[in-house]
Image (cartoon, helix red, strand yellow):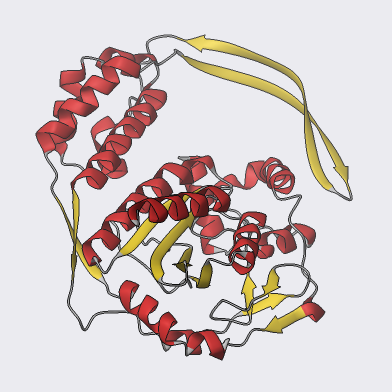
């Protein structure tokens, strides 16, 4: 619960992006000792700051003197082949979800019976020392002990209201899940831990069922992202920090957010089979029940100077917060179904390595021509 609040706060303040990647604004806030956190966490502000400082310690601050406004690469932007590529992916879709509540109830209570483990509640007492230096504030635990609390009966929280708030399910569905699970005795041992684990199980099962049951439909020929939006985009980067020169992309430089993106952009530039490509801008969004999804790349590959393959690629990247990953994974699966609904001979691929990707495509294409 606490981590979700902090993640939301960091998103709102621009410290991380929607994929959980650390942004330069976070490092600047840390350097100037101006990190903003929710008021309820102010008593542990020093600990949060120290942890965030440690996680983001490898992020480089960019020199504003190196900042550059990046122009369109007109040779690629006006290329008929880029227009053909864009026309294949530009259309918007709407989705519907086939959701079986009875199956959800069954999946949830069976998973609760299999994996739910709740230890008794404890009061944990700690004594710590603070080390204040120019680098910030760090803590060192000096003493810790715990007191076990058995069978809590006073101030029992409203579990139904809690789970409704966490899952948006109806009261009846939640009651059925709890009753069929036959695990309510664990609630008395540690109410908060029980509620958190049950909410986690239910949301995970809901996510699986949503992705499995989602269906995308193209809205029509008039609902799409126009190619001219690239002309309105104000793209900036920093020399020697987060941009590489491009001959094949829609902009004269590719701005990257991570070493992973830099590696892929370099591979696109150097590989003879990549005819042209673009890093998909933030405004290129696909609607999902879990929030908008923004794929990474669109690529045109040419084999033997004649066969053309059109791809939308999602490339793995480091995520700062662990709980972002399952949601992002589900969004990627929704994105795949979106492009399947468009048809247009566009292949959506979720890849780890450019080398493996290009070898696979060239091998498959060669075999198909035999």
- Name the residue at 37% across, 58% down: 348
- Residue 204 vs 121, above or below: the answer is below
The spot of residue 164 in percent (x, y) is: 25, 41
Instruction: Report whether residue 314 is seen.
Output: yes
The spot of residue 265 in percent (x, y) is: 61, 65
- Name the residue at 71% across, 50% down: 56
Residue 252 located left or right of residue 165: right
Looking at the picture, tell me which residue is in the foreground, 289 or 13.
289
The spot of residue 264 in percent (x, y) is: 60, 59
Looking at the picture, tell me which residue is in the foreground, 116 or 39.
116
Residue with the most extreme front position: 370
- Name the residue at 75% across, 67% down: 241
Examine the image and state in which quarter residue 298 appears.
bottom left
- Name the residue at 79% across, 38% down: 138
Examine the image and state in which quarter residue 247 appears.
bottom right
Looking at the picture, tell me which residue is in the foreground, 12 or 344.
344
- Residue 92 vs 291, above or below: the answer is below
The spot of residue 127 in percent (x, y) is: 73, 24
Residue 129 located left or right of residue 155: right
Residue 44 located left or right of residue 93: right
Residue 224 located left or right of residue 62: left
Instruction: Report whether residue 38 is seen.
Output: no
Image quadrant containing the N terminus: top left
């Amino acid at each position: 619960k606490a981590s979700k609040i902090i993640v939301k706060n960091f998103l709102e303040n621009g410290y991380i992006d929607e994929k959980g990647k650390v942004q330069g604004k976070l490092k600047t806030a840390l350097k100037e000792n101006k990190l903003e956190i929710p008021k309820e966490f102010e008593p542990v502000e020093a600990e949060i700051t120290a942890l965030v400082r440690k996680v983001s310690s490898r992020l480089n601050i960019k020199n504003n003197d190196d900042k550059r406004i990046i122009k369109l690469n007109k040779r690629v932007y006006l290329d008929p082949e880029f227009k053909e590529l864009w026309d294949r992916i530009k259309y918007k879709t709407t989705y519907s979800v086939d959701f079986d509540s009875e199956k959800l109830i069954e999946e949830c209570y069976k998973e609760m019976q299999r994996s739910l483990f709740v230890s008794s509640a404890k009061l944990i007492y700690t004594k710590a020392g603070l080390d204040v230096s120019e680098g910030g504030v760090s803590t060192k635990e000096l003493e810790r002990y715990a007191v076990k609390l058995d069978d809590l009966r006073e101030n029992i929280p409203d579990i139904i209201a809690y789970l409704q708030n966490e899952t948006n399910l109806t009261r009846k569905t939640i009651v059925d899940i709890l009753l069929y699970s036959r695990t309510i005795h664990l609630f008395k041992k540690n109410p908060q831990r029980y509620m958190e684990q049950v909410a986690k199980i239910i949301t995970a099962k809901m996510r699986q069922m949503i992705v499995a049951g989602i269906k995308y439909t193209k809205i029509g020929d008039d609902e799409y992202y126009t190619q001219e939006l690239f002309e309105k985009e104000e793209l900036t980067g920093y020399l020697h920090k987060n941009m590489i020169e491009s001959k094949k992309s829609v902009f004269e430089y590719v701005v990257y957010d991570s070493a992973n993106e830099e590696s892929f952009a370099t591979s696109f530039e150097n590989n003879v089979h990549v005819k042209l490509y673009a890093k998909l801008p933030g405004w290129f969004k696909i609607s999902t029940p879990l929030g908008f999804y923004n794929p990474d790349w669109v690529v045109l590959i040419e084999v033997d100077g004649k066969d053309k393959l059109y791809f939308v690629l999602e490339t793995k990247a480091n995520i700062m917060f662990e709980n972002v990953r399952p949601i992002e994974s589900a969004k990627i699966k929704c994105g795949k179904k979106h492009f399947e609904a468009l048809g247009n001979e566009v292949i959506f691929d979720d890849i780890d390595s450019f080398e493996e990707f290009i070898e696979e495509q060239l091998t498959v294409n060669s075999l198909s021509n035999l």
